[in-house]
Amino acid sequence: MALSITRVELWATGVEDAAGGVAKKLQKLTDAGANFEFVFARRSPEAPGKGVLFLTPLKGSKQKLAARNADFQKLGRIGAVRVEGTDSRGMSAKITKAVAEKNLSLRGYSAATIGKRFVMYLAFDSQADATQAIRTLKRKM
């Protein structure tokens, strides 16, 4: 099975947990030409009224400057990996098992299938863990 396995830069910012909080942040980057492949937002139970927004990719200096001006930070300490391929039964289990067998703990995980294709994002505690996951997946999958 041919998979596309790549490292991605993950960006994040705080958002108001109110109508339009996410939209305001995304619009600032869209105005700079950003076209997102992955967006994830959640409330922060430890900070009522606040949330966090994650996204990728940002390309070029204009988009990255707009992100910084909107209080986004590149999460350089977190290693993020994008995996894409033809979907089949058990694919998520196979990929997460391969990572677990190398004693790599997932900091975050998101996956979706559209038609016959899937895409998933795996987040690790470090760039080194992401590198090891990429090597493992390219070898085992």
Image (cartoon, rainbow, N blue to C red):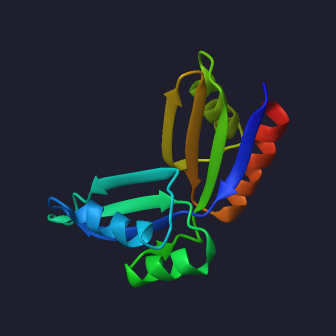
Q: Residue at x 43, y 60 (%)?
A: 54
**Labels in figure, total:** 0
Q: In this view of the protein, which residue sits in the foreground, 4 or 102?
A: 4
Q: In the image, is residue 112 above or below residue 130?
A: above
Residue 29 visible here: yes
Q: Residue at x 34, y 54 (%)?
A: 41
Q: In the image, is residue 123 above or below residue 30?
A: above
Relative horizontal placement of residue 24, taking residue 138 as reference (left or right) = left
| Residue 87: x %, y % from top left | 62, 23
Q: Residue at x 15, y 65 (%)?
A: 49
Residue at the extreme top: 89
Q: In this view of the protein, which residue sits in the foreground, 99 or 6?
A: 6
Q: Quadrant of residue 51?
A: bottom left
Q: In this view of the protein, which residue sits in the foreground, 55 or 115?
A: 115
Residue at the extreme right: 139
Q: Quadrant of residue 24?
A: bottom left
Residue 133 visible here: no
| Residue 78: x %, y % from top left | 57, 64
Of the 4 image quadrants, the one containing the N terminus is top right
| Residue 111: x %, y % from top left | 51, 36
Relative horizontal placement of residue 49, taking residue 83 as reference (left or right) = left
Q: Residue at x 36, y 64 (%)?
A: 26
| Residue 43: x %, y % from top left | 25, 56
Q: In this view of the protein, which residue sits in the foreground, 32 or 81?
A: 32
Of the 4 image quadrants, the one containing the C terminus is top right
Relative horizontal placement of residue 25, taking residue 72 as reference (left or right) = left
